[in-house]
Image (spheres, rainbow, N blue to C red):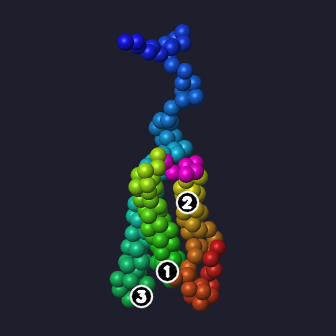
Amino acid sequence: MSAVTAEHDHDGHHHDDDHAHGPEKGWLRWVVTTNHKDIGTLYLLFALAMFFVGGTMAMVIRAELFEPGMQFVDPQFFNSMTTMHALVMVFGAVMPAFVGLANWMVPMMIGAPDMALPRMNNMSFWLLVAGVLLLASTLFMEGGAPAGGWTLYPPLVLQTGKALP
């Protein structure tokens, strides 16, 4: 029988220069990841965080509606909370949770090693984070947050005088 031996360079390592860097470690791993499971986890954790933010907004709304009259917030802020609650729950909790589950499950279900365009997949998550931060920043701007109610019904926006920023 003959044996096949692997050739080594002078320091004892194989020729793997193009894979020498390996995956990132620590928090940078989550920022630049192209692994579909990591990106799915980011989406799911973000959806969970937005669920709690939207739940807090719902508690403000329900506290104001506990008794007739104005108790905690003025009517403009109440309408803003209603609108922000709807936007955060739909576009910050429900849809990212669906995308996170899809990122996790679809490649495994179809037998693919990874998603197509993984860097674009990662970038889409970070654009979602930037969009939610931009939406949250409207609470602190001079005109205030959008106050169109949970349906963004145009007559309500016109009646309150607060258009979308």
Q: Is residue 115 magenta?
A: yes
Earlier sequence position, callout 1 versus callout 2: 2
> Would you say residue 44 is visible in this rendering?
no
Q: Identify the element where label 1 is drawn.
A: loop
**In the picture shown, does residue 12 fall above or below 88?**
above
Give the residue displayed 47% in from the left and 61% down from the top.
99
Q: Amino acid at mark 2?
A: Leu
Q: Which quarter of the figure is the N terminus placed in?
A: top left
Residue that badge 2 annotates:
128
Where is residue 9, by image quadrant? Answer: top right
Q: Which mark is residue 122?
A: none
Earlier sequence position, callout 3 versus callout 2: 3
- In three-dimensional space, the C-alpha distance between marks 3 and 2, rounded to whole angstroms, equals 37 Å
Residue that badge 3 annotates:
69
In front here: 108 or 128? Answer: 108
Per the picture, the main secondary structure of the magenta-coloured stretch is loop
Residue 134 image offset from top left, x and y in percent: 59, 63
Mark 2 surroundings: few (<14), some (14-19) or many (≥20) residues within 10 A? some
Q: Amino acid at mark 1?
A: Trp
Q: Nearer the viewer, mark 3 or mark 2?
A: 2
- In three-dimensional space, the C-alpha distance between marks 1 and 2, rounded to whole angstroms, equals 20 Å
Residue that badge 1 annotates:
150
Residue 44 image offset from top left, x and y in percent: 42, 57
